Image (spheres, helix red, strand yellow):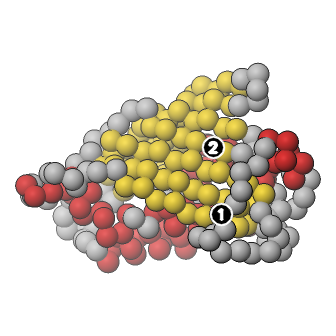
Amino acid sequence: MLQPLQRRVFNIAARHGSLHHRRLFSLPNIPFLESDGSATQRYRERKILPYRQSDLYRIVADVESYPHYLPYCVGSRVFNRNEREDGVILMDAELTVGFLTFQESCVCAVTCKPYESVKAVASSSTTLLKTLNTIWRFQPASPNSFDLSKNPPLDRTREENAASLSSDGPTMVTLDLEFAFANPVHAAVSAKFFGQVSQLMVKAFEERCLAVHGPGTR
């Protein structure tokens, strides 16, 4: 049975094209799409969540758990992990992305900076995606909500961040997502609904936090 978030992803796709009667590879070549249809698309999402910075970081740093909650991620395997003297963790991970009728795997270089950020950069392209980069950032936020567009969070030093970890939150979560399809036709077909993936990822992350840590402290 599909989970609620998976149903929403499926419904978005279904509204903009048949999933059963036509495969993307059977679509005709559209010359006017060749110029910029495969350009890199960039999205940013921000949200304040009622959890500690360290707790949110640990969820995202657990790369092998991604298939359990992130949309379009159907497989994840870490096959190399090293920790530097400064505490930064470097991983090589194989991520499998499922999109409509396609399923592709790529190797990503993952950099985890406790408890500040998790960055994943695809080091190999696939027949579906030629670019796939994500970075999650975590910053202490004021208990009082504010307008992010007018008052973005200020950068803090590592010492200030460390001092805030003993609090119960809240934490500002920022997701930056970059992706580019290898085929301009695929990009055009997906444009109407794939642009919502960053919103879906943050929503899925929020649901994961609720499942792991409960409702948090508001």
Q: Judge whether 46 appears above or below 25 on screen.
A: below
211 with respect to 185 (left or right): right
Do we see residue 172 in this rendering?
Answer: yes
Which secondary structure, mark 1? Answer: loop
Q: Judge whether 109 appears above or below 7 on screen.
A: above
- Name the foreground residue: 151 vs 30: 151
Residue drawn at 36 percent across, 69 percent down: 193
Point out residue 133 in the picture as x, y percentages from the top left corner. Answer: 47, 45
Residue drawn at 62 percent across, 57 percent down: 174
Residue drawn at 80 percent across, 74 percent down: 144
Q: Residues within 10 Å of mark 1 (few under 14, many from 20)?
A: few
Q: Amino acid at mark 1?
A: Pro
Which secondary structure, mark 2? Answer: strand
Whole-angstrom CA distance, mark 1 to mark 2, is 20 Å
Point out residue 135 in the picture as x, y percentages from the top left corner. Answer: 57, 47
The image quarter in which residue 194 lies = bottom left
- Name the foreground residue: 82 vs 102: 82
**Front disc: 1 or 2:** 1
Q: Which residue is mark 2?
A: 118
Residue 96: give its label.
none
Do we see residue 47 in this rendering?
Answer: no
Q: Which residue is mark 1?
A: 152
- Name the foreground residue: 23 vs 217: 217
Q: Residues within 10 Å of mark 2 (few under 14, many from 20)?
A: many
106 with respect to 181 (left or right): right
Q: Amino acid at mark 2?
A: Val
